[in-house]
């Protein structure tokens, strides 16, 4: 199968969260199944191109792409996913993709006034690049709101091109909380027919033009990244207003759990951690813990667990209940290390705690790929009390690193972490979980975990159970393959 995969993040080039990890890994797994996959990504100034071989694609040449009435000359550059044959096409248009914030940090997403135009440009450029490559995909797979209007453009604006007649489309929802809602003017910028915009139309939500809804209505198939989240977002509690659309498309809607790229996340061969370790020899893990604490200028105590967090600092990730519970959490015999960036109020909260309790709370603000690996390797527990979590990757990484996850039972967290006490009989639990989104529920779970930590045999078993789990992409990539067949059958 020829598969075009469009994403606004692709690891290791551009990553904000899990979407980047998935887009850097799933295409490789599909290639291993024998498919011909090409990945498309904007050439952001945020990309560190050092160490990657990047070449100009002559076949595409100087390509005019029209957005909001202006024509932008667009070039395309080609590289590969590291250690693989998967080609990545970087859509180059400095006007849209060279962006910085006031601190001079390069941005992938912005809150600037032309955010809609940036991804309209990318969407059109993907289609036009494919035309120029004369490479007709059987599947065009888009991800989240930034690429969600591609299926509509393909069926409507570019329907004159018989070249795409056999191309079926798939959309993956990585997070329904981000929908790309813009004013009606945006449809003119994208040259979408105004007749398509009316109350409750396939592209309209509450008077705005909604990229994600457009994707859900025009794609042949839809999926999200865990079974539980797939069920959750068909309800008003989690659907963020799009539950009706998903119920309408229920026969074409799938839940497929994300996999993990164990060539990147594995304590056995992780080049980013100072001490490597395995299930059979965990001694390196303690060394990593000492190293991690030194990194944060915190003391090491035998018998005191370190609880790690690596997260976007946003409401989704459960920081409100952490804030509620903070006084009690700090009473507990544990240390906390946090790596994250996001909303100021959460950064300030941890900064304040660090100043008051420097031996108990460490915070590193910003993005830091290497530290993310060190926290996975050096912590005893990993905390992820998310309000909602489509899949969540860090808890799955944690399992492999013998770092016991403490999670709220929602979305992919519910599908990947088995509570130790609930599975006490079989002794096959892998972590601790709670359901109520409240501070007290969180505190009692952390307490349960700390108590269990002091039963060394039980804890050892917990670690080994998690490390034995296999969430590699092979299984999930086969599910995507089945979904693609469903999409192709529908097109016929
Ligand atoms: P989400 O996509 O909602 O952010 P996931 O758990 O799916 O959540 O994926 C998060 C990914 O982003 C993980 O690979 C995690 O290590 C990474 N990450 C999050 N915050 C940071 C940070 N501040 N520095 C480095 N990596 C981070
Ligand atoms: C999103 C979700 C996260 C998921 C990731 C990759 O950002 O918040 O739960 O793991 O996408 O699918």
Image (cartoon, helix red, strand yellow):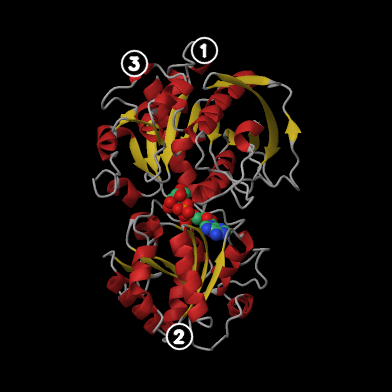
Answer whether labels 2 and 3 touch (C-beta < 8 Å).
no
Residue 273: image tag: none
Mark 2 / mark 3, whichever is N-terminal:
3
* Left or right of residue 455: residue 76: right
Instruction: Name the residue at 40% across, 43% down.
Output: 178
Can I make out residue 366 in this image? Answer: yes
Q: Which residue is mark 2?
A: 456
Q: Residue at x 33, y 22 (%)?
A: 197
Residue 131 spot, x, y in % from top left:
59, 19
Residue 65, how many percent across, how many down? 59, 21
**In what quadrant of the picture does the C terminus appear?**
top left
Disc 1 versus disc 3: distance between alpha carbons?
A: 21 Å
* Relative side of 270 to 442, left or right: right
Outermost residue on the front side: it is 102
Q: For the residues marked 2 and 3, what is the alpha-carbon distance in whole angstroms?
A: 66 Å
Circle 2 packing at 10 Å, graded few (<14), some (14-19), many (20+), is few
Other-residue count near label 3 (Cα within 10 Å), few / some / many at <14 / 14–19 / ≥20? few
In the rendered structure, the answer to whether residue 317 lies left or right of residue 283 reads left
Q: x and y percent of residue 58 in the render?
A: 74, 23
Marks 2 and 1, how far apart at CA: 65 Å
Give the percent coordinates (x, y) of residue 389: 38, 54
376 or 138, which is in the foreground? 376
- Above or below, 444 relative to 237: below
Residue that carries the numbered disc 3 in the rendered image = 195
In this rendering, is residue 396 above or below 169?
below
Q: Quadrant of residue 193?
A: top left
Question: Quarter of the image containing the N terminus?
Answer: top right
Sequence-first disc among 2 and 1: 1
Q: Give the mark toward the camera: 2 or 1.
A: 1
Q: What label does residue 161 carry, if any? A: 1
Using residue 391 as the reference point, say whether residue 403 is left or right of it.
Answer: right
């Amino acid at each position: 199968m020829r598969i075009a995969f469009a994403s606004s993040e692709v690891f290791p080039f551009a990553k904000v969260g899990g979407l980047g990890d998935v887009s850097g890994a799933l295409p490789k797994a599909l290639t291993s199944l024998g498919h011909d996959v090409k990945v498309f990504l904007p050439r952001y100034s945020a990309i560190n191109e050092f160490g990657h071989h990047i070449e100009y694609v002559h076949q595409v040449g100087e390509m005019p792409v029209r957005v909001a009435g202006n024509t932008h000359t667009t070039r395309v550059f080609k590289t590969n996913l590291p250690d693989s044959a998967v080609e990545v096409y970087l859509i180059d248009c400095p006007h849209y993709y060279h962006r910085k914030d006031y601190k001079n940090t390069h941005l992938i997403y912005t809150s600037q006034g032309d955010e809609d135009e940036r991804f309209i440009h990318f969407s059109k450029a993907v289609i036009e690049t494919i035309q120029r490559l004369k490479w007709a995909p059987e599947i065009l797979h888009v991800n989240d709101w930034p690429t969600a209007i591609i299926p509509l453009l393909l069926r409507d604006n570019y329907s004159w091109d018989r070249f795409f007649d056999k191309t079926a489309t798939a959309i993956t929802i990585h997070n329904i909380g981000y929908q790309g809602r813009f004013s009606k003017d945006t449809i003119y910028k994208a040259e979408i027919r105004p007749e398509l915009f009316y109350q409750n139309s396939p592209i309209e939500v509450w008077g705005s033009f909604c990229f994600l809804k457009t994707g859900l209505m025009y794609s042949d198939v839809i999926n999200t990244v865990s079974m539980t989240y797939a069920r959750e977002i068909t309800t008003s509690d989690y659907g963020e207003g799009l539950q009706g659309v998903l119920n309408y498309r229920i026969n074409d809607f799938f839940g497929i759990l994300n996999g993990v790229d164990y060539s990147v996340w594995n304590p056995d061969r992780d080049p980013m951690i100072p001490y490597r370790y395995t299930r059979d020899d965990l001694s390196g893990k303690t060394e990593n813990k000492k190293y991690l604490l030194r990194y944060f200028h915190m003391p090491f105590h035998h018998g005191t667990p370190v609880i790690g967090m690596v997260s976007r600092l946003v409401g989704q990730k459960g920081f409100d209940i952490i804030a509620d519970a903070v006084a009690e959490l700090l009473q507990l015999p544990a240390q906390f290390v946090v790596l994250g960036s996001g909303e100021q109020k959460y950064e300030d909260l941890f900064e304040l705690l660090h100043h008051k309790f420097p031996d108990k709370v460490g915070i590193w603000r910003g993005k830091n790929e290497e530290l993310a690996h060190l926290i996975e390797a050096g912590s005893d527990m990993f905390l992820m009390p998310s309000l909602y979590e489509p899949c969540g990757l860090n808890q799955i990484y944690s399992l492999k690193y013998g770092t016991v996850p403490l999670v709220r039972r929602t979305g992919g967290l519910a599908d990947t972490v088995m509570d130790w006490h609930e599975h006490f009989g079989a002794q096959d639990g892998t972590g601790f979980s709670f359901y109520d989104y409240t501070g007290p529920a969180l505190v009692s779970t952390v307490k349960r975990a700390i108590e269990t930590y002091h039963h060394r045999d039980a804890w050892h078993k917990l670690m080994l159970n998690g490390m034995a789990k296999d969430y590699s992409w092979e299984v999930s990539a086969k599910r995507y393959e089945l979904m693609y067949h469903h999409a192709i059958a529908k097109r016929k």
